[in-house]
Image (cartoon, grey):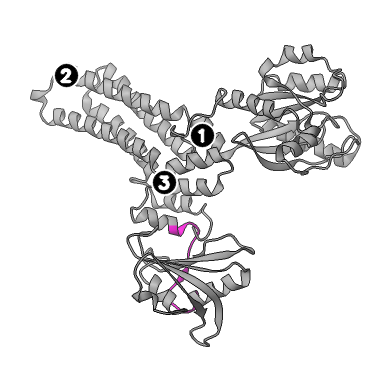
Amino acid sequence: MIAESDTIAAISTPPGEGGIAVIRISGPQAVQAADRVFRGRRPLAEVPSHTVHYGFVRDPDTGETADEVLATVMRAPRSFTREDVVEISCHGGMIAVRKVLELLLSAGGVRLAEPGEFTKRAFLNGRIDLSQAEAVIDLIRAKSDQAHNVAMKQASGALSGKIRDLRGRLVELMAHIEVNIDYPEHDVEEMTNRFIREKCAAAMAEIDRLLNTASQGKILREGITTAIVGRPNVGKSSLLNALAQENKAIVTDIPGTTRDVIEEYVNVGGIPLRLLDTAGIRETADLVEKIGVERSLAALEDADLLLLVINGNEPLDGAERELMARLAGRQTIVIVNKTDLPVRVELEEIKSMFPAGRIVMMAAARHEGIDALERAIRDLFFSGEIASRDLTYVSNVRHIHLLKESRRALGDALAAAEEGMPIDLIQIDLQRSWEALGEIIGEAVSESLIDQIFSQFCLGK
């Protein structure tokens, strides 16, 4: 049975070789547990909080030295978990860090932490709310500076502050209604009804402002799934290599070189792209290439953005015209590639099917035209600009769902007020809206949901 009062330990740095590795211990027995294996000038139980101490980790039974370390002591409540915390920094080899952790666990009184348990304790102990806790994993997974900025603002409580302000307004409104229910002789019905309508409309407008950032926030958080498509030998792999700034895909003059979908994350002007370099789409009798083409078509259907690459040095063929027609209604940017050679493709025909801003002239093998592609992506998904870091983006799917649920309840309350419904019935809708907002920051949230959220974290965080 796992108890929240247990003392826990885990490796908090990634596996593998490195300069240092950090083992984190948290709980009521953290300092005593570290003292059982740490040997320095003084026992850690006697040192001041927030100090670092040099010493060795030794097997308490044999006296054998496991590693030369630094131990950092942080006493409750001034720690990440608001519990006593000791962090042992040892050499970053896999053997050394494993030995130190095994000695801590075998000395007794300490168990291995569950994934995300340190952050979970920070939440349960009131240091952070649930939306801030979820931002921690976004910080870890951020694939661009913009995604990092969004996560950092949420971790700092920017979204929490707006949610608490909204809930405060709803509490004020519900209190006003409650007074009128208890003391109807003092109620001016028309005034109360107008007050409800004004407050509901203002709260809905604030939620709309947050939801308007949702699509962009989700893109910054998760990236844009982007499929590079086109017929064989038009430069799709050259484009992938240019965007990744390294040779990720094999490039040859032989059509059909790429036979499977190659995946790579890249950062284009602050926008994370999950790039899928697909096999050239064409009719083929080659069984392996045929499977690659089928996978390309599947990737095409799942993608948020399609980069259709066309060889600018050759006229369009029937397969390309068919593919262009198929993609005309999708989020597509047409890349006319190989513009370092004479342009023989029918540009006017392409322009007739795609807006001018979605046609980019490139020489991918020479890395020419990357800036133009970046501008086209910004125009398509961010109206030309990613908003300043002062804007609070909503990027978490759970938060978006709860904001929409809260707004629906407010809409029901507003409609009821406009129809002259009894205010005690309106109160029910307002309560539902208030509770949905509370779930974002972890008020009245189920234990199973908390466990589900923190299970997504890595071990040691």
Three-letter amino acid code of the residue under disc 1:
Gly
Please tell me whether mark 2 sits on a helix, a strand or a loop: helix
Q: Nearer the viewer, mark 2 or mark 1?
A: 1
Apparent side of residue 110 relative to residue 90 in the rendered image (left or right): left
Mark 1 closeness class: few <14, some 14–19, many ≥20 residues within 10 Å: many
Task: Choose the circle earlier in sequence order: 3 or 1.
Answer: 3
Disc assigned to residue 83: none
Q: Relative to 277, say whether 99 is above or below.
A: below
Was residue 111 drawn as part of the magenta stretch in this picture?
A: yes
Please tell me whether mark 1 sits on a helix, a strand or a loop: helix
Task: Choose the circle earlier in sequence order: 2 or 1.
Answer: 2
Instruction: Determine contact: label 2, label 1, CB under 8 Å.
Output: no
Which residue is pictured at 81% across the width and 34% down the height? Answer: 365
Query: How many angstroms separate mark 2 from mark 1 (CA)?
Result: 42 Å
- Nearest the viewer among 21 and 301 is 21
- Can you identify the residue that label 1 sits on? 217
Q: Nearer the viewer, mark 2 or mark 3?
A: 3
**Residue interval drawn in magenta:** 105-118
Q: Is residue 283 visible?
A: yes
The image shows residue 347 at horizontal and vertical percentages of 79, 15
Which residue is pictured at 51% across the width and 47% down the height? Answer: 139
The quadrant holding residue 49 is bottom left
- Can you identify the residue that label 2 sits on? 189
Which residue is pictured at 70% across the width and 19% down the height? Answer: 328
Query: How many angstroms separate mark 2 from mark 3 (CA)?
Result: 41 Å
Disc assigned to residue 132: 3
Apparent side of residue 155 relative to residue 93 in the rendered image (left or right): left
